Image (tube, helix red, strand yellow):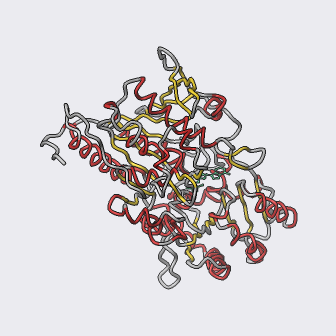
Amino acid sequence: MTRAPLGDPVSDRPLEIAVLTTEFAPLGKVGGLGDVVAALSQEMARMGQSVTVWMPAWRQVWESDIAIRRVPLARPLPVALGRDTLPVELLAAEVGDPAVRIFFIEHPAHFAREGIYNDPATGEGYADNDRRLILFQRAALEGMKAIDLRPDVLHLHDHQAGLVPVYLRTLFRDDPFFRRTGTLFTIHNLGYQGLFASDVLNTAGLPMDLFYPSGPLEFWGRVNFMKGALLYADRLTTVSPRYAEEIQSSEEFGFGLEGVLRSRAGSLTGILNGVDETIWNPATDPHIAAPYDINRLERKSANRTALLSEMGLAAEPDGPVLGIISRLVDQKGFDLFIPQVPAILDAGFRIVILGSGLRKYEEQLATFRDRHAGRLAWSRGFDEPLAHRIEAGADFFLMPSRYEPCGLNQIISMRYGTVPIVRETGGLKDTVVPYDPATGEGTGFGFQDYTAEALMSAIRLAAEVWKTPERLEALRRRGMEQDFSWRRSAGAYLRLYQEIAAERHAAEPPGHVPGPGPVLKAG
Ligand code: ADP
């Protein structure tokens, strides 16, 4: 490989970064991905980089109040999808200051539906999610060409954008347009890999030898979008250092891709997510009853009173208030938590839960809500303002996750002086320091084993501490003093972008005619 000449222009000018994502809060959000991509993009713009975001024009986008304009194109982008060629339009908007430019891929039949990934009528993924994701990714690449936006780095988030590194090394390999474009793939959750039947490759316009025999996209007889990205992206990141280790260590965390991840260990780093402090700030939060900060912590109790009354919970007998805001899925530890609900209530807690998800958990929560009216409240659905009021009003916040790539709610909780109780895994372990009764140190409560005993001993310890206001306040204050802003993490991403861009430019100096490219090896 030729070395980058000294004074390589890559390091002297803002980088052109194109982000492919299916979520961008608040224009399309299912979980933390939307928060993370929005905050990181904004921080990059603040750091003087040129950022564009590419996402589908979901129905949520149409329902938002941002000003959307149509990008004038000579004709709609012709995007190949299997044997069809679909006409796709581009829409654009600017958000934030300094502005991040967002381009929306418009194809209403595929994107403007009630749900993003899942059909709310069934709770299941849409049957044509493969076509929707392929259309999104190919159209984004075509859109960049149509507006002549040549990215230095494509930042790809989760399997929903996982085919892009594969496209750049196959269909677009000899395309001079992307010659100097490198790729960064970020794993937000390895539990969702994008698994489809093998004929998805025909839809994607990719050669069958990527699949068979034991090709790089093949995974137990199916096509795996995540695996393609893990093998072909220039660099990989995930959202906490601990999770970066865990996913290489065993099938429990790697979900069958641990070997692939180990093969790329030198290119994989864990960068902790931050939280957007303009959105999650108890001093300026427009959704809560009584704004507060570390110097006016006593005002938190007004939010607690308001939350209890809003959720129909009894004021007496008083005891700790435990909040949960979560997708109701196995990953988040509901099979551990639900059988312990009676014991947690017996320990004096009132419980507030916000979220929806698997039917089995929803049914159990509905039963508890009836049986323990006044002590347990459950609000089904997605409700951003209520999420703010729970963070402000609860004493403790529970995350008993089976695994947790990073987790945002424990970080948000600490900012709100709400003490997290977490299972010590992934990002939860990287962000919460477990309380030590001997020294009083810590920022939350932790437990290691995925067992009822371990969970309940952390819960009981929290209940003990609640009875001693000085100890509780010390924990709250320590949490509020932590710095989980995006500044530091964004710096780590920028360094990676610069490395990737410098490598691409060194490999493809101006005037260089692209060679045959790397030979695709079986994964
Ligand atoms: P994940 O991305 O795995 O769902 P994270 O903790 O990383 O979990 O991020 C979850 C984000 O989604 C947080 O901002 C959380 O407040 C939000 N969230 C989850 N469920 C709901 C809900 N039902 N209503 C409002 N916000 C929710």
Q: Position of residue 245 (x, y in %)?
A: 42, 68
> Looking at the picture, does residue 506 appear above or below residue 421?
above
Asked which quadrant contains residue 221, the reply is bottom right
Between 130 and 207, the one lying in front of the other is: 207
State the residue lying farthest toward the top: 74
User: Can residue 342 be seen here?
Assistant: yes
Between 123 and 490, the one lying in front of the other is: 123
Asked which quadrant contains residue 455, the reply is bottom right
Between 73 and 285, the one lying in front of the other is: 73
Q: How many marks?
A: 0
Q: Residue at x 59, y 63 (%)?
A: 418
State the residue lying farthest toward the right: 371
Q: Position of residue 45 (x, y in %)?
A: 38, 37
> Looking at the picture, does residue 287 appear above or below residue 335?
above
State the residue lying farthest toward the bottom: 438
Q: Is residue 362 left or right of residue 280?
A: right
Q: Is residue 54 left or right of residue 513?
A: right
Q: Position of residue 385 (x, y in %)?
A: 66, 46
> Looking at the picture, does residue 426 appear above or below residue 415?
below
User: Which quadrant of the rendered structure holds the C terminus?
Assistant: bottom left
Q: Position of residue 414 (x, y in %)?
A: 53, 61
Between 115 and 212, the one lying in front of the other is: 212
Q: Residue at x 60, y 39 (%)?
A: 131
User: Can residue 396 be seen here?
Assistant: no
Q: Residue at x 52, y 65 (%)?
A: 256
State the residue lying farthest toward the left: 6
